[in-house]
Structures are given as C-alpha cells and as structure tokens.
C-alpha cells in the first residue's frame, strides 16, 4: 500500500513539474510582456499548484488550504515578489465567455468558504473603483489565463488563475517603480500583439473585476460575483 501511495505521489509530482516547465517556457521564452511574471519565474518565486476542475466547491477548499500555506510563507517585508498560480490542465477548449463564467464561479466558491473578513484596504463592492478580491484577509489581483484567450499574453499552455497579492503592487509604489514597471509591460504588450490590452487600467480608475478574465467587456458588463455579509 505504501508503495502504491508513493508511486501515485511521484507521478503527481512529475505531472506538476512538467506543467510548471510548460508555464515557465511560456513566460520566459515567448517574449511575455509582464516583467514581473518573468522575474518570479527567473527567481523561481512561484507557488504552483495543479487542480482537477475549475468552478468547483471541492477545489475551492483545496485552493484555500494551499493559499493559507502560501500566505504563511510569504515575507511581507521583502521587496521580492512571490506569486501563487493555480492550473487546471483538464479544463480545455473553453471560449472566453465560458472561461469567464467558470473563473467567477470558482471565485464565488472561494469566497463562500473563506471565513476571514475582507481586506480593509480594498472594497468588496464589485462596482467600486477600489474593488479587489480578498481571500484570507488579503487582497489579490487575479489574472485569468487560458489557451483560447484573444490576448497573447494570457494565452497560457493550460487554463490558469494567477493570484497576485495587492501588497506587491503597493510595494512597487513605495519603491517608486510602479509606473516604470507598468509602462514597460504595456510597451512589451504592444510589441507582442500590436496593442495594449483595452481592459487594463490602474487600480482606482475603475473596478479591476473587469480585468480578471482577460475578455474584453463593454460598459454594460455586470460582474456575477456577490459578496456575503460578514
């Protein structure tokens, strides 16, 4: 029995390593515009996890458990960046609309299982210009990625959700580097695709919920997320 468990664990790790290598290649070898993403992969500052299904209650519990470990290991005093990535290799052939629906379904389940109050530094109203998604008391900027994204920068080898701590962006502001990093990313995005992602805006200009899935949405788009009362 022990040998069976060990073999299964080794196979899981082999699969995770292979998926990580694919994602690393996508970021480092394909002229990816996000210099922060390139930095964390170069420095191997990525907490990388594989899950079966996107938009699942059981997966929400697993992600929260792994996110808790990630936050426990994160040094909020450092200037180094450390990113949490959830990948869903079995979730394939999604349209942008289908991906958006599953992304928000997963975020809704994560929120429902989360017993921590919303990060007081951001708003939980999805219509607010200061909205950011909160889990375990910390705000995150979410980047949805999948193979069928219209934006090349989000056309990842497998379906994924990237959890970037808002504290990291605030650290960039404190260092006086935020605008330089932002402008560099946008320049590289233009070089890659010929245009800047039309959904990208600085925090505080409009609700960042519009940016999470990567799909271009119009002014009438309504976020399907509903925050619970604490």
Image (cartoon, grey):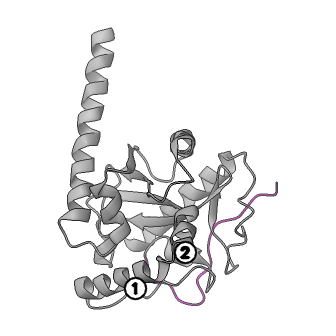
Closer-to-camera residue (77/46): 77
At 26% across and 91% down in the image, what residue appears?
194
Residue hosting label 1 = 183
Which span is picked out in magenta? 215-230
* Image vertical order of residue 173 relative to residue 83, above or below: below
Residue ranking furthest to the front: 175
Q: Which mark is residue 173?
A: 2
**Other-residue count near label 1 (Cα within 10 Å), few / some / many at <14 / 14–19 / ≥20:** few
* Image vertical order of residue 152 relative to residue 23, above or below: below
Closer-to-camera residue (90/212): 212
At 44% across and 58% down in the image, what residue appears?
81
Disc on the earlier residue, 1 or 2: 2
At 21% across and 54% down in the image, what residue appears?
22
Spot occupied by residue 204 in the image (x, y as percentages of width and height): 63, 82
Residue 36 lies in what quarter of the image? bottom left
Q: Does the image show residue 1? A: no
Spot occupied by residue 100 in the image (x, y as percentages of width and height): 48, 68
Q: Is residue 223 in the magenta section? A: yes
Spot occupied by residue 123 in the image (x, y as percentages of width and height): 72, 70
Q: Is residue 78 in the magenta section? A: no
């Amino acid at each position: 029995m022990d040998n069976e468990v060990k073999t299964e664990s080794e196979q899981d790790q082999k699969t995770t390593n292979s998926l990580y290598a694919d994602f690393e290649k996508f970021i480092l070898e394909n002229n990816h515009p996000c210099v922060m993403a390139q930095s964390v992969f170069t420095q191997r500052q990525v907490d990388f996890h594989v899950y079966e299904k996107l938009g699942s209650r059981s997966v929400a519990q697993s992600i929260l458990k792994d996110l808790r470990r990630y936050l426990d290991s994160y040094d909020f005093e450092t200037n180094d960046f450390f990113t949490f990535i959830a990948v869903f290799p079995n979730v394939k052939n999604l349209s942008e609309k289908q991906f958006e629906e599953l992304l928000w379904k997963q975020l809704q389940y994560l929120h429902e299982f989360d017993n921590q109050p919303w990060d007081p530094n951001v708003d939980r109203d999805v219509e607010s210009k200061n909205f950011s998604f909160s889990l375990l008391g910390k705000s995150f900027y979410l980047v949805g990625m999948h193979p069928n994204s219209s934006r090349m920068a989000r056309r990842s080898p497998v379906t994924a959700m990237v959890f970037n701590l808002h504290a990291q962006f605030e650290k960039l502001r404190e260092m006086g580097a935020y605008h330089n990093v932002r402008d560099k990313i946008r320049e590289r995005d233009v070089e890659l695709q010929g245009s800047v992602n039309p959904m990208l805006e600085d925090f505080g200009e409009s609700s960042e919920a519009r940016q999470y899935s990567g799909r271009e949405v119009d002014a009438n788009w309504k976020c399907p997320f509903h925050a619970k009362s604490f």
